[in-house]
Image: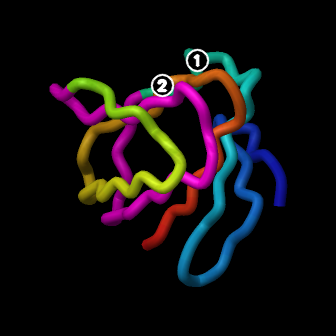
């Protein structure tokens, strides 16, 4: 696996049911852009400190261990950089 040069994250585990994705603590916040995904996703926070998730036109939500977020297909959203590594599990 490893880091794709076009993405601000590293996929560390990929199965047909989920992806475990990691955002490095040294990431440049400019890389965390507003985007939309083509499919519905449920994201589970595995670890992180001070990271936030923000939907378009909403206040940011802190990403704490155990938090689950449903993201409908084509909804604008972004991640806001925290203090350490952010590790999430994307169920699709």
| Residue at image coords 61%, 66% | 19
Q: Is residue 66 visible?
A: yes
User: Mark on residue 80?
Assistant: 2
Give left or right: position of 91 versus 14.
left
The residue lying toward the viewer, choosing from 62 and 28, is: 62
Q: Is residue 43 magenta?
A: yes
Q: Quadrant of residue 20?
A: bottom right
**N-terminal-most mark, 2 or 1:** 1
Give the answer, above or below, for where 87 lies relative to 5: below
Asked which secondary structure carries label 1, the reply is helix
Q: Of all residues shown, which one is farthest toward the left?
A: 57
Q: Secondary structure at mark 2?
A: strand
Depicted 61 relative to depicted 59: above or below? below
Q: Quadrant of residue 42?
A: bottom left
Q: Decide: marks 2, 1 in contact (CB < 8 A)?
A: yes
Q: Which residues are magenta?
A: 34-58
Please report the residue visible at 56 percent of the width from the left and 23 percent of the height from the top.
81
Residue at 58% from the left image edge and 24% from the top image edge: 82
Distance of label 2 from label 1 (alpha carbons): 7 Å
The label nearer to you, 2 versus 1, is: 2
Near mark 1 (Cα within 10 A), the count class, few <14, some 14-19 or many ≥20, is few
For the point 44% across and 58% down, the residue is 43
For the C terminus, give its image quadrant.
bottom left
Label 2 crowd bin: few (<14), some (14–19), many (20+), radius 10 Å: some
Q: Is residue 40 left or right of residue 47?
A: left
The magenta stretch spans residue 67: no
Which residue is tagged 1? Answer: 29
Asked if 52 appears above or below 64 in the picture, the reply is above
């Amino acid at each position: 696996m490893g880091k794709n040069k076009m993405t601000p994250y590293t996929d560390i585990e990929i199965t047909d049911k989920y992806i475990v994705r990691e955002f490095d603590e040294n990431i440049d916040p400019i890389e965390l852009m507003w985007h939309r995904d083509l499919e519905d996703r449920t994201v589970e926070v595995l670890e992180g400190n001070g990271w936030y998730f923000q939907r378009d036109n909403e206040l940011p939500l802190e990403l704490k261990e155990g938090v689950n977020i449903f993201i409908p297909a084509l909804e604008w959203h972004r991640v806001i950089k925290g203090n350490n590594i952010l590790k999430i599990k994307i169920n699709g």
